[in-house]
Image (cartoon, rainbow, N blue to C red):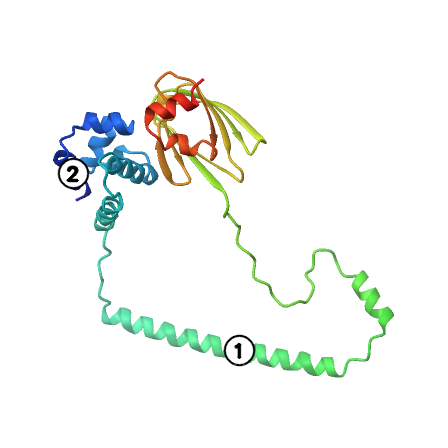
Amino acid sequence: MVGEYLRQKREDAGLSLKDISEITRIRTEYLKALENEDFSKIPGEVFIKGYIRAYLHALSLDPEEGINLYLEDVRKDLPVEPHIKESKWQQFRSAHLLIAGIIVLITAGAFLYGLFSREKVETLVEPETKPSEVLVQELERPKGLPLPISPVEVAEADYTNKHVLEINTIEETWIYLKIDNDLSYSMLLKPGETKRWTAKEGFFLKIGNAGGINIAFDGQMLGAPGKRGHVVRLRLPEDLKKLQTQPEQKIEGLED
């Protein structure tokens, strides 16, 4: 559905796949995979959506309709679980298991209620504890035992306010990466590799083959940061606007 939509819009504009590739700096084989809806040839959903947006921006069209068509295609291809009707024996067995579970819960509840009531009575007749004895009891408490306080829900890890950098390698490319002016990495990426990092403040990159990679930043597909074989220095998010401009302006502003 989305592939036919892209092809039709491109043909209406009188452009070829090569024309779209020159505008977006996306390889022709990836554009062809979009039109054929062969999404397995594109590394990851972030890049698929990014390519669709770049494709339609090149035609001066709103990309949201294309993204919605892609999502419909994905939902349509999801396997539907068959509905299996239970046999009478399965229904009978399920009903008995339910009844047995209810009986167990009632029994456990009665036991806990009796235990709680007995502990409450024992507490009422317990002799008064002197302050010095309380202090001794606290000092003798083994380390690691929790204090008798009300349960508190554990907060989930907070991943908000973090930048995400994703790189998809097309050709062998050397990269130097610095995260938050703290962690540094130097690596040689092979074709087909996809790497992802997170940062609180941002990233600094030095790229040995600027045309050999495609970059996605915070879910936005930015494409290649420069020409094939050129060395580029890049700071994100500071240089984000430069990467969003036309390729000629992008290269002039970032390459060594």
**Residue 211 percent across, percent down from the top left:** 35, 22
Residue depicted at x 26% and y 32%: 41
Q: Residues within 10 Å of mark 2 (few under 14, many from 20)?
A: some
Residue at image coords 43%, 23%: 254
Q: Residues within 10 Å of mark 1 (few under 14, many from 20)?
A: few
Q: Which mark is residue 109?
A: 1
Asked whether disc 2 touches disc 1, contact meaning CB atoms under 8 Å apart, the reply is: no
**What type is the residue that disc 2 sits on?**
Lys
Q: Nearer the viewer, residue 134 or 225?
A: 225
Rendered position, 253 above or below 104 = above
Nearest the camera: 55 or 151? 55
In terms of secondary structure, where does tag 1 sit?
helix
Residue name at image x 36 percent, y 25 percent? 249
Q: Which quadrant holds the N terminus?
A: top left
Vertical position of residue 214 compared to residue 125: above or below? above
Quarter where residue 146 is shown: bottom right
Q: Is residue 21 left or right of residue 130?
A: left
Query: What residue does disc 2 label?
Result: 9
Disc nearer the start of the sequence (2/1)? 2
Classify 79 as above or below 203: below
Q: Which residue is nearer to you in this view: 227 or 73?
A: 227
The Cα–Cα distance between marks 2 and 1, rounded to whole angstroms, is 67 Å
Location of residue 131 in the rendering, given as x and y in whole percent from the top left corner: 85, 71
Give amino acid for label 1. Gly
Quarter of the rendering occupied by the C terminus: top left
Q: Is residue 229 left or right of residue 129?
A: left
Front tag of 2 and 1: 2
* Towards the viewer: 164 or 87: 164
Q: Residue pushed farthest right? A: 132
> Which numbered dot is residue 164?
none
Write down the quadrant of residue 18 in the picture.
Answer: top left
Looking at the rendering, which quadrant does residue 138 occupy?
bottom right
